[in-house]
């Protein structure tokens, strides 16, 4: 199990498939390969 400060989790993108945390620039999950949602800032 991995513990991160809450501030770090806010900066990371959570995978909808495996719930793993990924750096915000990735488009695919580094753990399971699923497509990641686009960050809120890029959706506009």
Image: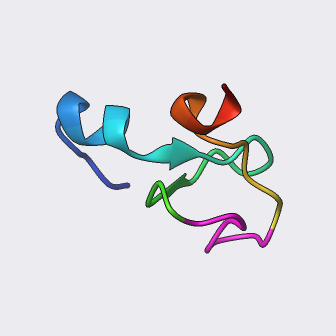
* Coloring basis for residues: rainbow
27 magenta-colored: yes
Image quarter where the N terminus lies is: bottom left
* Looking at the image, residue 28 lies above or below residue 20: below
Left or right placement of residue 20 versus residue 27 in this view: left
Magenta: predominant secondary structure element? loop
* Looking at the image, residue 21 lies above or below residue 32: above
Q: Position of residue 19 (x, y in %)?
A: 64, 44
Image quarter where the C terminus lies is: top right
Q: Position of residue 12 (x, y in %)?
A: 41, 46
Q: Position of residue 20 (x, y in %)?
A: 57, 53
Residue at image point 67% right, 48% down: 15
Residue at image point 82% right, 62% down: 34
Residue at image point 75% right, 70% down: 32
Q: Which residues are magenta?
A: 26-33
Residue 39 sits in quarter: top right
Q: How many marks?
A: 0
Residue at image point 23% right, 29% down: 6
């Amino acid at each position: 199990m991995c513990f991160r400060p809450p501030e770090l989790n806010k900066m990371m993108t959570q995978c909808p498939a495996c719930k793993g945390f990924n750096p915000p620039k990735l488009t695919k999950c580094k753990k399971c390969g699923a497509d990641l949602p686009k960050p809120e800032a890029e959706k506009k």
